[in-house]
Image (tube, rainbow, N blue to C red):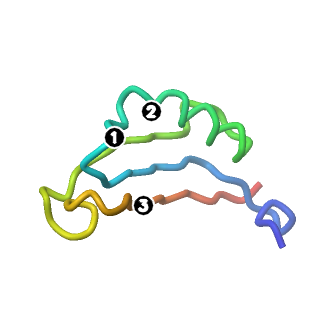
Amino acid sequence: MRCCARGWRVGNCDLTVVCEAPRVGPHAQAMREVIATDLGIGIEAVSVKATTSEKLGFTGRGEGIAAQAVCLLVRA
């Protein structure tokens, strides 16, 4: 069951992409727009940023990309 059906809505969302390549910066605005639309919130409530793993692990070797997301849920 969707959270909105239980009386909650997304307040904001903070996302971090972990990769060595490609560079996320040129795509961050477009990503924010799509995520905001999908979540039904304003673009100002969505943060997209990127970091590297300093050449460590599978992301550092360029074998994949990881992502972390945190969303604040508030009573509707």
| Quarter of the view holding residue 42 | top right
Q: Residue at x 62, y 42 (%)?
A: 35
Q: Residues within 10 Å of mark 3 (few under 14, many from 20)?
A: few
The quadrant the N terminus occupies is bottom right
| Viewer-side residue, 14 vs 51 | 51
Comparing labels 1 and 2, the label whose residue is closer to the camera:
1
Q: Secondary structure at mark 1?
A: loop
Q: Residues within 10 Å of mark 2 (few under 14, many from 20)?
A: some
Query: Which residue is disc 2 drawn over?
Result: 28
Q: Measuring from the top left, give residue 38's x and y in whole percent.
A: 71, 44
Which three-letter amino acid code belongs to the residue tagged 1? Pro
Give the CA separation, mark 3 to mark 2: 15 Å
| Viewer-side residue, 4 vs 35 | 35
Give the CA separation, mark 1 to mark 2: 12 Å
For marks 3 and 1 on the same chain, the one whose residue lies earlier in the sequence = 1
Q: Measuring from the top left, give residue 66's x and y in whole percent.
A: 38, 61
For marks 1 and 2 on the same chain, the one whose residue lies earlier in the sequence = 1
The quadrant the C terminus occupies is bottom right
Q: Residue at x 65, y 57 (%)?
A: 74
How many marks the image carries: the answer is 3
Q: Secondary structure at mark 3?
A: strand
Query: Which residue is disc 1 drawn over?
Result: 22
Comparing labels 3 and 1, the label whose residue is closer to the camera:
1
Query: Which residue is disc 3 drawn over?
Result: 68
For marks 3 and 2 on the same chain, the one whose residue lies earlier in the sequence = 2
Q: Secondary structure at mark 2?
A: helix
Q: Residue at x 76, y 66 (%)?
A: 3
